[in-house]
Every structure is written in structure tokens, then in C-alpha cells.
Amino acid sequence: MPRSEAGLGDRQFALAEFLKEASGADAVEITRLELLNGGAIQENWGVDVSVDGGRLAGQQRLVLRTDAATGVPSSLGRIEEFAVLEAAFAAGVTVPEPLFAGADKAVLGKPFFVMRRIAGSAAGRPITLDPALEATRPAIAERLGRELGRLQTIRPPRDDLTFLSPDPGPAGQIAEFRAYLDGHSNPRPVLEWALRWAETHLPEPLPSVLCHRDFRTGNYLVDGTRLTAILDWEFAGWGDPDEDIGWLCCKGWRFGRLDREAGGIAKRAHFYRGYEEESGRRLDPDRVRFWEIIANIRWAVIAMQQSDRYLIGGARSLSTAITGRRATECELELLMLLDPDGVVAYA
Amino acid sequence: MRDLPRSLELLALARELLLDELVPLLPPDRRRDAHLIATVMAITSREASAREGWQQEIVELVGEFYETLGSFPSAPGDEERDCLTRFAADLRNGAFETSPSRAAAARAILWRLTIEKLREGNPHFLAANGVGDANDNRPIVAASEREQ
């Protein structure tokens, strides 16, 4: 069996039967099954099918998304992620069309969902560095702003999203980060210092919206010069409207173009313009800066949690094990943001 | 006693072999893994070259910092972790914020700690941020510019 089929290969029959029943088809044949790149926490499988009858009749290219061997604590389950994807799709956000969710573990041994496969690549460095995209990157940034504005039309309460926890607010997030650090073996003085700053500079609250919580370069598809889909909704939740903005502008997601502050692809102004026009809300640079500080702290904690998957969870993955070291990159950025004179004084 | 060449020299050669001759032979979807291995080799080399020197300096800096406050971070014999644990806890509580000079001294330690960690872990990121030199006079780093 080729490497690409390991894991789901022995479940192909059950999967075909599931797709047949879910789509109302007379017959479903899986013609290709491949494990796709990316997805440190989830597995994404490309599934090509030939469908006889029902709502998917014909040749279809699908993606099946299910859990990897080990996850991180804050991610949604696949059935919940499917519900978020449905809500985003209905709100007009550019996402793969969600098709079916499979909660019955008898099918694959774990929950999963199926969506349409969209053309394009999410790889960060080609998106930020490919000369062919040079002229269109500002338009992609503006489009991302519009997508975010559309996403934020989803607001609580929502009957279809009752599983989402209430917005913890920045104070709640700070408490969660500190609780994580309290249980971690290595002290992180820089993160503690930045958390203290955040605690003493909380912004005035705004009404909660649906946040993607991983809205960044690397999590959207670009096909040619076109943005074709926003991916990876596993961290979505109710939160502050500026949270995703700070996350996309966080230095950790600029992929070799640190000078382009909007996701490594453009100046902030392009991204901000798209967002402000779509949402009708003027951005406050101080609020965005606050959420960028939080973004760096959060990325540091997520990076450490990734290494925990090796250190504690037993995941035998070099990529996973080494990610924790990126926390120090976030700490440098926190120092540069909060003590800009320090780089001259101390470095 | 040990035979030559030294293990760090062999590591540098192994890394060059990996990047220069083996990576081009790999299918594109496995090249990132190979670069990851090269990065680990580089980190290993830098950490082995630096030994524990800078960590001891940080412990001493924190110790001196607390001495100027008239207190000591921990009982004699306690290790680096205890020293940084108290420093981190005091930062959480804003213990140095009432004195600008103490706050500045604490920040200086944070900068030093962070820069030293990145000199080993990712000197290219430091250089890209205008701090330090990517080559950093350490043997393996100069062997290739291709790590993350």
C-alpha cells in the first residue's frame, strides 16, 4: 500500500458506503485517496470519487478531515468544526462547501467531515515570496479583510453554534495562558512580563463576533493569483473583533517577509481597507496592537503545546517536537513591541 | 583522547552532505523534512559549542539583580530554574514596576535571555530583526544559509 493510503486505506469501503448514504447515491467508488500536506493537528485526505446518482452525481474531488493521532487542548472536534464551517459558508465567507459530517466512529474509528476540494495552495512561503504574485498580493490582503468582515457578521447567540464557549475576553485568555505556564516545566519570564503588560492595558470591550482564531497566511488557499478558500476552522470561537486582525498581522505569520505586516503579503493598509469597507467599523491601532501582543503570547503558548505533544503526548514527529522553540521568536517580538528602545540599549 | 575529526566537525560535514547532495534527490514533499533535520543539526552544533556558558551568566545576572534589591532569588545551591521561576513570578506580579530603574534592569535581563536563546536556536531570525549576525562566528551556521 502506498504511504499516501496508510491510515484510511482499510476503511475505504466503509467510507464509500457512508458517502453513498449521505449523498443519496446509488453507488460511490473511491478512485483516489491521498494524505494531503499540512495539518499538524488534523489529517486532511484528498478523496476523489465517482458517484452514481444523488446530490453528488458525477466525478467529485473532496477532502475528508479527521483528527491526527494527538491534538492540542483548545481545538474543536470535527463535528463542531463542521458546524462552524457551515455557518461561515452561509455567511458568504469563501470556504470549501461543507458536505457531510460523520460522528459515527464505526465508519473511520474517529469523527470526520467531508467538504469539497478547492484548487490552490496554502503553503506560506510561495504566497509571500513568489514573484508571480507580486502585483496581486495587496488585492489578496484586501480580500482577506473583506472575508474577515463577512465572518464577523456571525454573532452570538446562535442556535447552531451553542457548543462554542462564551467569549473569554482578553482577561480570560490571560488567565488561561498563565494557567498553562503554571503547569509548564520551564519558566518563561518574557511571557510573564508581556502578560502583565496585557493585564494592565485591557481595551474597552466590543460586542463578541465569531473569530477564526487561526486567520493567517498558511491557512488560506491561493490558486494562481486568486484567493480561493479560508481553511482550518478548528480554533474558531466567540471573541473580540480585533483578535483575528492582530493574529494575521503577528510577525510569526510573515514567512520570510517581515516587512509586510499584513501576513507577509502587503502593508496593513490594504488589509485594513478591505476589513473597514466590509465591516463598516474603523480600526483602532491601539486595540489592534493589544491583540497583536496577545497573538504573540498565544502563538508562543501554542508552539510550546506542540512540543508538549512530543514531550508528554508521545507524538514521534520532529516537526511537532521542534515547534516549541519558536516560542522564543515570539518573545523577541514581544520585547520589540513593548520595549522598542531596548533593541538599541540591550541587543 | 578522542579521535579526530571532532564530532562537531563531522556534524558540519554531514549537514553539508545532506543539504548539498541528498536534498536535491528527494521528492519535493520530503525536502522540508530534510531541511528540518539540517536545522536540528545546526542547533545541536551551536548548543554544543556554547555549552552552558550563557545560561550561567543569566543566572548570575538575575542573582546580581536581586542583590541590588537586597534579596536573593533562592537559597545557595539552587539551580537556574529556581532563579528564573522567581524572576518570572515577580514579573507576573509587577514587582519591579514602581521603580523605573528596576524595571529597566529587569528588561535588560529579558533581552539578554531571549537573544542568547535565539543565537543558538535561530540566529537568522535574530539577524532578520536587526539583532546580531546570522553567521555569529559559530561553525555550522556558516555552512549554509538554508535553515529556517
Image (cartoon, rainbow, N blue to C red):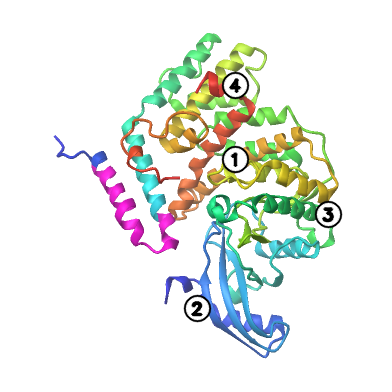
**Which residue is labeled 2 in the image?**
A10
Residue beneath disc 1: A251
- Find disc 3 in the rendering and name its residue: A153
Tell me if mark 1 has few (under 14), some (14-19) or many (20+) residues whose alpha carbon lies within 10 angstroms of its own. many
Residue at mark 4 to residue at mark 1: CA–CA distance: 18 Å
Query: Could you confirm whether marks 4 and 1 are on the same chain?
Result: yes
SS at circle 2: helix
Residue range of the region highlighted in magenta in the rendering: B10-33
Mark 2 or mark 1: name the one nearer the start of the chain.
Answer: 2
Question: Which quarter of the rendering shows the N terminus of chain A?
Answer: bottom left
Q: Chain of mark 1?
A: A
* Circle 1: residue type: Lys
Q: Are marks 3 and 4 in contact (CB under 8 Å)?
A: no
Chain label for disc 3: A
Labels 1 and 3: the sequence-earlier one: 3
Q: Residue at x 53, y 39 (%)?
A: A327
Q: Residue B24 magenta-drawn? A: yes
Quarter of the image for residue B5 reads: top left
3 and 4 marks on the same chain: yes
Mark number displayed over residue A75: none
Q: Is residue B66 visible?
A: yes
| Percent coordinates x, y for residue A96 in the rendering | 69, 67
- Mark seen at residue A341: 4
Q: Are marks 4 and 2 on the same chain?
A: yes
What amino acid type should be assigned to the residue bearing mark 2?
Answer: Asp
Q: Are marks 4 and 1 in contact (CB under 8 Å)?
A: no
- Which of disc 4 and disc 3 is earlier in sequence? 3
